[in-house]
Image (tube, rainbow, N blue to C red):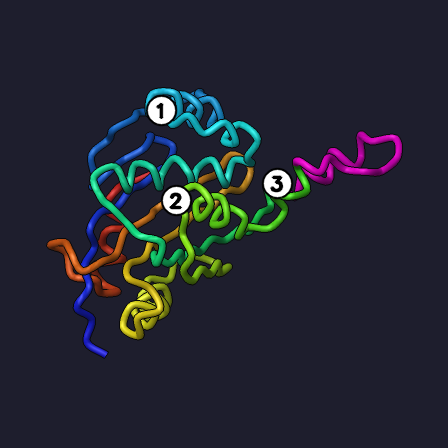
Amino acid sequence: MNSTFYTSDFVHLNRQGLFRKGKLLYPKAKNENLDTFLKSIYKELELNYSKFYKMDLLSKMGIICTEILLQENQIDKNTALVFQNNAGSLATDLEHQKSISKSSNALASPAVFVYTLPNIVMGEIAIKHGLKSENAFFIAESFTPNFIHTYTDILLQTNKANSAICGWIDLDSDRYNVFLTLISNNGKIRYTPDNLKQLYTNVDE
């Protein structure tokens, strides 16, 4: 298949802060807590989405990065979500285990348990933006642009989706890294594995 799709926009989140198209929008203080940092962006964006505070960190990262990604872009309900990471929902799994250990009756908090699957972040994004299309979450040792490109391109070429948000969203203890792209018919950067890899690495940790 010959791809005719483009990268409309892209965002990064790492220890330096939150970037859009390589430009640092929200710098993060060296010792600033990730949760505090995400909440500060949420307040500045005036999202008015109270469910945000109940989410795990993986979902908060996904919601905030998607909001930045879509600030100047419109999507419809047929936008696919194709994500990948290394740690799955490990950070939340550990919180879940802690809550069991602290509980006298060995029952964990349902508010924590509901986030013990990595694909919940996609569910939160889909609910907030009314998405009804395909979604898939893959676990890999590292970001694999060829695989992500192939999977996403097939969805677009076969009209399973009109556009797609895809990329890497990883959280493991104090280590985190997010790279999300919006793929559609509009843009200047051709959607290819090489360009996807280049965009992923264009913001240094």
Residue drawn 80% across the image and 30% down it: 102
**141 or 1: nearer the eye?**
1
Quarter location, residue 83 = bottom left
Q: Residue 140: horizontal and vertical position, in percent?
A: 48, 60
Q: Is residue 57 above or below residue 183?
A: above
Q: CA distance from mark 2 to mark 1?
A: 27 Å
Q: CA distance from mark 1 to mark 3?
A: 22 Å
Residue drawn 24% across the image and 51% down it: 199
Task: Give the magenta range.
Answer: 93-111
The mark that comes first in sequence, 2 or 3, is: 3
Q: Which quarter of the image is occupied by the C terminus?
A: top left
Q: Residue 75: horizontal and vertical position, in percent?
A: 28, 50
Q: Mark 2 falls on what kind of element?
A: helix
- Residue 28 shows which numbered tag? 1
Q: Which residue is mark 3?
A: 92
Q: Is residue 110 magenta?
A: yes
Quarter location, residue 11 = top left
